């Protein structure tokens, strides 16, 4: 009971003077920040090195007097997995027809080319990659070469469409609008 009265009295004395209370709060904040820093330093992040050559390079850099050590990092130039792959467990396949715009035929003597274009289906777009008929294709790659004099080449990737060229002829494949 005596302790409770002392604490209440100390609290009233501290909060009564604004300047003294401000100093108390400031010191409390600095103390909490220092305490948090000690916790972070006490538990450094764990790291692992998988390649033996990198481990020996790091060991030699640490042993040397050079404080500006450089560490080699090798990055992939191309994605090592298909960014368009969709898990069938998370997203089951629904069999509905798409509302992609079909190619309207213009009779210019390239019936095989127009049939090949109308058979293509644009499924996804991401950056400079497009998924056409289940294949990931980069800009400049050949889309199809079926019985044509000029192969179909992916020329440009837009937000919702791609441009495919065959010689001097250009075709556009589109994905249906997400607001439909």
Image (tube, rainbow, N blue to C red):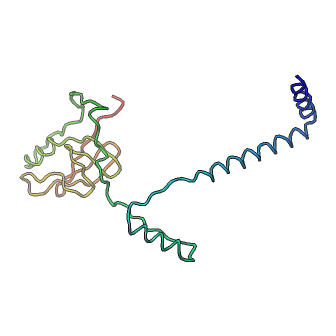
Above or below 2: residue 36: below
Residue at the extreme bottom: 65
* Residue shown at the point (57%, 53%) measured from the top left: 44
Whether residue 58 sits left or right of residue 131 in the image: it is right
Q: Residue furthest top?
A: 1
Q: Residue at x 24, y 52 (%)?
A: 137
For the point 24% across and 30% down, the residue is: 93
Measured from the top left, where is residue 127 in percent x and y?
Answer: 35, 50
- What is the x, y in percent for residue 112? 7, 47
Q: Could you say which is closer to the camera, residue 151 or residue 28?
A: 28
Image coordinates for residue 98, horizontal then vertical, percent: 23, 31
Quarter of the picture containing the C terminus is: top left
Q: Is residue 3 above or below residue 59?
A: above
Residue in the foreground of this view, choosing between 112 and 5:
5
Residue occupying the far front of the picture:
2
Q: Is residue 125 above or below residue 155?
A: above
Residue 99, image x and y in percent? 24, 31
The total of numbered circles placed on residues is 0
Classify the position of the N terminus by image quarter.
Answer: top right
Q: Is residue 7 left or right of residue 85?
A: right
The residue that appears at 29% across and 44% down in the rendered structure is 84
Q: Quadrant of residue 140?
A: bottom left
């Amino acid at each position: 009971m005596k302790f409770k009265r002392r604490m209440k009295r100390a609290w009233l004395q501290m909060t009564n003077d604004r300047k003294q209370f401000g100093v108390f709060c400031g010191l409390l904040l600095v103390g909490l920040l220092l305490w948090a820093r000690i916790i972070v330093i006490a538990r450094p992040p764990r790291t692992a090195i998988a390649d033996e050559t990198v481990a020996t390079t790091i060991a030699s850099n640490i042993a040397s007097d050079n404080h500006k050590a450089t560490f080699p990092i090798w990055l992939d130039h191309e994605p090592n997995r298909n960014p368009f792959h969709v898990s069938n467990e998370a997203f089951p396949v629904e069999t509905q027809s798409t509302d992609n715009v079909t190619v309207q035929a213009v009779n210019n003597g390239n019936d095989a080319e127009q049939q090949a274009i109308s058979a293509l289906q644009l499924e996804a777009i991401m950056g400079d990659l497009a998924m056409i008929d289940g294949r990931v294709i980069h800009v400049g790659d050949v889309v199809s070469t079926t019985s044509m004099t000029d192969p179909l080449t992916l020329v440009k990737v837009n937000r919702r469409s791609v441009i495919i060229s065959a010689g001097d002829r250009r075709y556009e494949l589109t994905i249906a609008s997400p607001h439909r």
